[in-house]
Amino acid sequence: MNRDTLLNIARFVILILVQVFVLDHVNFLGDLNPYIYIIFILLAPLNINKSLFIFVSFVLGLTIDMFGDSGGVHASACLVIAFFRPVALRSVFGLSYEFQTVKLSNIGFGEKLAYVTLMVLTHHIVLFSLEIFNFSHILLIIKKTLFSSLFTIVITMLVLVLFRRKSDS
């Protein structure tokens, strides 16, 4: 196993542990939690095998579901953003993504924020739509999506800035 594979395995395990044992117990303003475990999907290598990426994203969400007894909503949301990731990358980075020249550690703050925002909003819309699963509660879905997304985006950007590799700065 090479260094990047070990780094991704460590990131997978650490993000799950932090999510399950710390962030799932935050409940900011009553019911808002940051869902930073999706950083794993955001930072996955661009050249990763697509089938492996989809499978690992599913396992990530399923693991969060098993700890939180949430019936598969996280697994579903992770699958959606894993499938949506190439579209998000292409829309934010354009030709840089097409030619596999974009490195998330080397991009500007604005592009990174746009990518994180697009992915987090997509994840949260799916997550809360499936969790609540009642169209008559659309305002609650929108409220939870917006506020949890804002919380998650802020925490994610802080994590990405604070824990970037020293060689990338």
Image: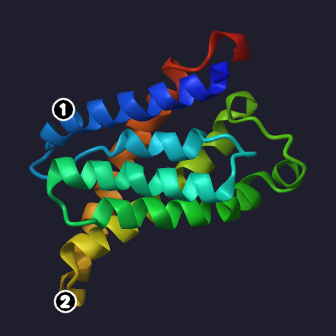
Residue pictured at 74% horizontal, 28% vertical = 106
Give the quadrant of the N terminus. Answer: top right
Q: Earlier in the sequence, mark 1 or mark 2?
A: 1
**Of all residues shown, which one is farthest toward the top?**
166
Location of residue 124 in the rendering, given as x and y in whole percent from the top left corner: 37, 61
- Residue 32 visible in the picture: no
> Would residue 15 appear left or right of 102 to someone viewing this image?
left
Q: Which mark is residue 47?
A: none
**Of all residues shown, which one is farthest toward the left?**
30
Label 1 sits on a secondary structure element that is: helix
Location of residue 166 in the rendering, given as x and y in whole percent from the top left corner: 64, 10
Residue that badge 2 annotates = 136
Amino acid tagged 1: Phe
> Would residue 118 appear left or right of 154 to someone viewing this image?
right
- Using the rendered view, name the quadrant where residue 126 is placed: bottom left
Q: Closest to the observer: 51 or 151?
A: 51
Label 2 sits on a secondary structure element that is: helix
Q: How are the colours assigned in the image?
A: rainbow
* Mark 1 or 2: the one toward you: 1
Residue that badge 1 annotates = 21
Location of residue 61 in the rendering, given as x and y in whole percent from the top left corner: 36, 54
Residue pictured at 55% horizontal, 24% vertical = 7
Location of residue 92 in the rendering, given as x and y in whole percent from the top left corner: 72, 55
**Of all residues shown, which one is farthest toward the front?**
1
- Residue 96 visible in the picture: yes
Residue pictured at 48% horizontal, 53% vertical = 57
Amino acid tagged 2: Ser
- Using the rendered view, name the quadrant where residue 140 is placed: bottom left
Give the quadrant of the C terminus. Answer: top right
Q: Residues within 10 Å of mark 1 (few under 14, many from 20)?
A: few
